[in-house]
Structure formats: C-alpha cells, structure tokens
Image (spheres, rainbow, N blue to C red):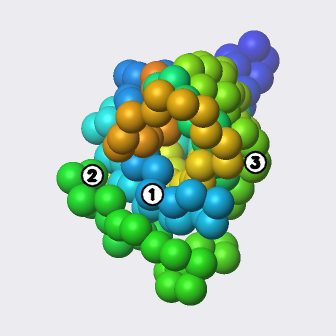
Amino acid sequence: MKRLVLALVCPLLLSACSAEVAVETPPLTQNIPVTSVLEPAYVEVAVDLPPETQGLDVTVKEISGTLTVHNPSQAFTLKTVGRLSLTGNATPDSPLFYSQNNLPPYYATAEILLPEREFAPGSRTPVTVNSPTLVKAIGKKRLWIIVSNTVTRATIGGTLPLQIQLENIILRATVTKSFNGLDGALGVGGL
C-alpha cells in the first residue's frame, strides 16, 4: 500500500518541481547629455543588458532597479524625467536627440521610470524603481531610456557640457524556473 501511495505522489511532486533564484545584474553607468535651457529636450540612450539576463525562459516574480542620479554640475539645477521603452532606435554608442516636435512614436507608450524632479548642483540622489516594463525587459538584449532634461536654474561658475549621470544601475529580480517532465521512471513513459 505504501508503494502505491508513493508511486502516485512522487510523479506529482517531481512534475511540479521548480527553482526560485534571486539574480542581480552588474552595475551599469549611463551619461545623459543635457541639451536645453528652459524648454525640455529629449535624449534616447540604449542600454545593453548583461548576457546573464538575456534569453531566459523564466517567470519573473519580482523585479526592481536601483540607481543613483548624479548632477555633476556645480552651477546648474537640472530637471529630468526618465521613461523606459522596449523599443528604440539609439545604440549604446549613439544616443538620439529629440525635441517636443519630433518625438518618436513609441515615446507615448514608454513607461515613466523616473517621475519629473529637479536635481540640485552636485547632488547624488538614490532612486528605486519598480516597473511592469522591467519584468518584460528580462530576457531582452537591450532596452532604451528616454530622458527629458533641461536646465531650470543657473548660478555663476558653470561649465559645459552638461550631463545627468545614471550611476550604478542595478536590476534585482526573483525568478522561477519550472522543470516540467522530471518525473523520470515514475512517469507515464517510465516503468
């Protein structure tokens, strides 16, 4: 009788096997040029995701990102908004620049990742993001960040060129992988 129960329970347990793993990407840093005063300008940058996150056949249970927004200028306050897109035209070596009049068609569907805020001169601001689009990014080779930026205040002594630095971008995810069909000899095709 014990064998019969074991023979019935083991295939169910083995076919429902899965592993849950916490993964973290290596830190990335991306420089975003600031190209406008008082009127927003838009810069699209491409970020290649590490090979460890590409082509994965997993279920993402939870994902978040952390980064530090750094305004290295000692004289300019910068206003920034960041959007995340799974579609884009920029490459990691060639950012694309837009104005309000020629935004790309996918801009409207890009998710707001960093709500509008001002970054004081010399500031480093830690940011945590949770985004449904980040879930979809796992398994992709590249994602695009579209940043609207402008100078809102200036003091004496500023130097050009200006940029916002997105430092130490790290994605942290908890993923599961099911192992269907591991019922072996106890399964339908086994002994």
Marks 2 and 3, the one that precedes in the sequence: 2
C-alpha separation, residue under disc 2 versus residue under disc 1: 18 Å
Residue type of the residue flagged with mark 2: Pro
The quadrant of the picture occupied by the N terminus is top right
Which residue is drawn at the image coordinates 36% and 41% (left, top)? 160
Which residue in the protein does label 3 denote? 115
Q: Earlier in the sequence, mark 3 or mark 1?
A: 1
Disc number lying in front (2 or 1): 1
To which residue does mark 2 refer?
Answer: 92
Q: Which-is-in-front pick, marks 3 and 1?
A: 1
Near-viewer residue (64 or 183): 64
x then y, percent, for residue 84: 58, 56
Q: Quadrant of residue 147?
A: bottom right
Instruction: Using residue 106 as the reference point, say whether residue 140 is left or right of it.
Output: left
Q: Nearer the viewer, residue 142 or 73?
A: 73
Q: Residue at x 50, y 54 (%)?
A: 145
Q: Secondary structure at mark 3?
A: strand
Which residue is at 59% across, 26% downward? 121
Q: Are marks 2 and 3 in contact (CB under 8 Å)?
A: no
Looking at the image, residue 30 lies above or below residue 87? above
Looking at the rendered structure, the kind of residue marked 1 is Thr
Q: Which residue is mark 1?
A: 35
